[in-house]
Amino acid sequence: MSPLRLGKRLRRANAHPHQRRLSLEKLETRQVLATFVVTTNQDTVDADDGVVSLREAIAMANSQAGEDRIEFDLGSDAATTIRLDFGELTLTDAATIIGPGPALLTIDAQQQSRIFDIASTEGDYQFERLMLVNGAPSVPPFSWPPIPRSEVGGGAIRSITTGNLALENCVFQHNVATEGGAVMAFGNVRLYSSTITGNTGESGTGGVYTQGSIAVNSTIISDNASMALWEYSSAGGIRARGDVTVIDSTISNNQGDFASGISADGNIRLERSSVTDNLFDAVAGRGRIEVEFSHIIGNAGAALGAAEVFVTTSMISDNGSAFYAADEFGTREKSLSSRARSCETVQESTAAVSR
């Protein structure tokens, strides 16, 4: 091929209208999580002592914009306790706090204060592998006007963020508050592989209370108590203003004067779970209750109460009564007028009760 013809071909190729030109594009901004490591079990604030306390780590995380991570390296594999001597620990920025395991690290408020207070109204927070005990918000005596429940709620954790609160592999024990003996939250709550036991709500829910929805998975909620008298908006175990989903979990031996186990304004779904031996109604909601592959046994009050109840392949027996709907009590036979009779076992069938 002659040089003249080759040159014409190259010029035609370079002039191709669909040929892309190289350019520089601005990359997405990525923020790396800052990690702060706790190295002492003492509740101290001393910049010159050569160690980092949990209180100091939280203060550093609060001062660092964006989501942060707090871990523990306490120099030993033995179980240890952090005793709070200077009041609750306040979080003001999104954070994840990961302990070595609930059998290895206990945070004890000594019944002198709440443990964690999430004071930010936005952001997601996560707690993992911790045991939180003896939290009790300080309540001034004889206060007037009365202090709102939101101010004195959440014995172990109070969260006013509208973001998500995730609790994984944690134990909450012997915490006390006016509302939400263990946890009080404004946003959605996720409980996974945790234990909520022996907590008390002095005039509200004993275990976990949220104004959002709650998802419970592989968790034990037992022996919690609501001391409220005939209070619909409370429960012994868990109470949500939104929906409740319980999967592979146990709700047992909780005490409440309305719903001892679960109470919700939204819908409730139980799957492969047990609700047993609670001291009043087991599960109560204003929406729809769905029960599948579950046991609801030995509760002192009604097994299920809601606008609609659907039960599939489950056992419901030895309760104070079976179902109730709205303002009247009744089973599928529509013959019950009180809570005096237990319900038959439900196998391979669906029960529906509606207004």
Image: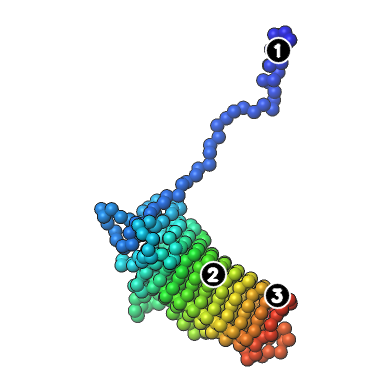
Residue at image point 47% right, 59% down: 125
Report the disc number at residue 310. Answer: none
**Residue 101 position in % (x across, y down):** 44, 63
Kindly tell me whether residue 6 is visible in this rendering: yes
The answer to whether residue 121 is above or below residue 317 is above
Residue, disc 1: 6
What is the C-alpha distance between the residues marked 2 and 3?
22 Å
What secondary structure is found at the residue carrying circle 1?
A: helix
Q: Are the residues flagged by discs 2 and 3 in contact, CB closer than 8 Å?
A: no
Q: Earlier in the sequence, mark 2 or mark 3?
A: 2
Residue at the spot x=54%, y=70% of the render? 219
Tag 2 secondary structure: loop
Distance from disc 1 to disc 3, alpha carbons, whole Å, reads: 79 Å
**Inter-mark Cα distance, 1 to 2:** 76 Å
Q: Are discs 1 and 2 less than 8 Å apart at CB?
A: no
Colour scheme in use: rainbow
Locate the N terminus by quadrant. top right
Tell me the kind of residue under disc 3: Thr
Q: Nearer the viewer, mark 1 or mark 3?
A: 3
Residue located at (29% from left, 61% from top): 44
Q: Earlier in the sequence, mark 1 or mark 2?
A: 1
| Nearer the observer, 276 or 104 | 104
x, y (%) of residue 284? Answer: 60, 78
Quadrant position of residue 49: bottom left
The kind of residue tagged 1 is Leu
Per the image, the residue denoted by label 2 is 219
Quadrant occupied by the C terminus:
bottom right
Instruction: Tell me the element at label 3.
Output: strand
Residue corresponding to mark 3: 312
Answer few, some or many: residues within 10 Å of disc 2's Cα (few below 14, many 20 plus, some between 14 and 19). Answer: many
